[in-house]
Image: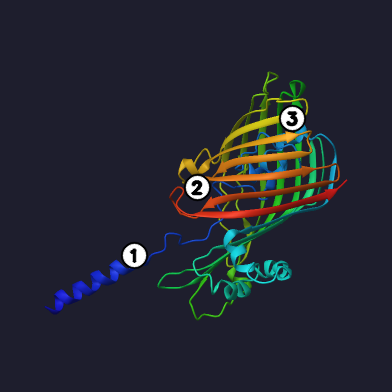
Amino acid sequence: MREFLSLNKIFFIASVLLVVKPAFAKLDFEDHAFPELVTSARALAMGNAYINKVDDSWSAFYNPAGLGTVRKPQFHIANIHLEASSGLLDVIGNGPAYEIPQNYIDSFDPEDMRSKLAKNQGELAHSRINLFPNITVRGLTLGYMYSQRDRAIINDDVANNYEIAERKDQGPVMALNASFFGGIFKIGASAVYLMRKDLYKSFGPTDPVDVSGNDFKNGKSLQVTAGARLTLPWDFLPTVSAVLRNATNNDFEGASGGGLPDAIKQTVDLGVSITPQIGKISRLHLEANIKDLNDAYDTDYKRRLAAGAELDFNRRLFVRAGWGDGWGSAGLGVRTRTFILDLTTYAVDRSLDGFREEEDRRWVLSLASGF
C-alpha cells in the first residue's frame, strides 16, 4: 500500500512539473528570422524582406550588393533606432507621460525592470537601441555600430522566476561593392569587427538581482557578409539576390567573464522581387525572402519566410507592409536630403519550436540626420 502511495506521489509530482513547464523557457534573439547585427526600421516594416530593396547604409547588414544602388552620398551623424514591445509599453506607460523616457532608460537595467514587472507577471518586456553613425557613398560604407537588446519577464507559473537576457554588440563597419554589365549584376562584402557581450540569467522570487561581469559571455569575431544581386532590365525590374552571412565561418575568440558567446552560424538568405512603376512619381516594390535557407538554426521553414511591400511617392513618403516570423508588420517613412523618420510595428513568435503560437508585438522609432 505504501509503495502504491509512493508511486502515486511520484506520478503526481511528475504531472505537475509537466504542466507547469514553461513553453517559452529561454529568452532568445530570433536569429533565424532577424540575423542582422543592426536592423532597419524600414526593413522590419516589410517583414524584414529587404535583401533586394536595400539601397542605403543598411546594405552593410542586409546585402552589401545594395551599395551599388545608393543614389547620393550620406553622412549620418545621428542614426538611432529605438524599440519597445507592447509588454514593455504596458509596464512603462502607466504613469505620467513625462516619466516615460526615464522609464524606457530604466528598462535596460535588470533591477529596475524587476520592480516594474512585479505587477505585470507573464508580460515579456523587450527593448532595443541601435546606433549607426556612418558615411555612405555608392560602393562604400564606413561606420561604427552599437546595438543593445534587453529582454525580461517574471514568469506567471509555480516557479515565478525572473528571467533576463541581454546582448550588446559593437564594432567598426566597412562595406564595399562592385557592379558589372552596366549595373545589372552587383556583388559586395561587408566586415564588422564584432565585440559581443551576452547575458542569460534567472533569479528566484526572493533572490537579489545580482549581475556581475562573470555572468556575461564576451568575445570578438570578424564577421563577413557577402552578397550578390541580379536585376534584369525588363518591365517591373525582376531581381534575385543571395546573401551569405558569416562567410568566413569565424568563431568568437578572446573569452572573458563567463566564456565565449555562442557562435554566429553561417546562413544563406535568398530573395526575389519586382518593382513596377505605377505612376509618374510612384513605385511599388514587392519582395519575398527566405532566411537561413540551409536551416542552420533548425527552425520551422514557415518562420523563416518573409514578404514585404513598399509604396513610395517621389522617394519622399513611404507606406510599407509585410509578414515575417509568422506575423504582420507595417510602417510609414519620411525621407529628405538631411532627415529620415521611420515608424514601424512588427512582431515575433515567442515559441521555441512552434508557429504563430504567441505574438510579441514591437514598436519602432528610427531617426537619422546628417548631410
Residue 166 makes an appearance in the image:
no
Colour mapping: rainbow
Q: CA distance from mark 2 to mark 3?
A: 38 Å
Q: Kindly identify the residue that appears in the image at 66 percent across and 32 percent down.
A: 285
CA distance separating discs 3 and 1: 54 Å
Q: Are marks 1 and 2 in contact (CB under 8 Å)?
A: no
Report the residue at 48% width, 72% height from top: 161
- Tag in front: 3 or 1: 3
| Amino acid bearing label 2 | Tyr
Q: Secondary structure at mark 3?
A: strand
Comparing 112 with 66, the one in front is 112
User: Mark 2 sits on what residue?
Assistant: 297
Query: Disc 1 marks which amino acid?
Result: Val
In the rendered structure, find residue 282 and report the number of the disc placed on it: 3
As helix, strand or loop, the secondary structure at mark 1 comes to: helix
Q: Position of residue 252 (x, y in %)?
A: 61, 55
Residue 89, percent from left and from top: 62, 63
Task: Give whichever of 354, 99 is nearer the camera.
Answer: 99
Disc 3 + disc 1, Cβ < 8 Å:
no
Q: Is residue 180 left or right of residue 205?
A: right
Q: Which residue is mark 1?
A: 19
Residue shown at the point (77%, 44%) measured from the top left: 334
- Report whether 334 appears left or right of 6: right
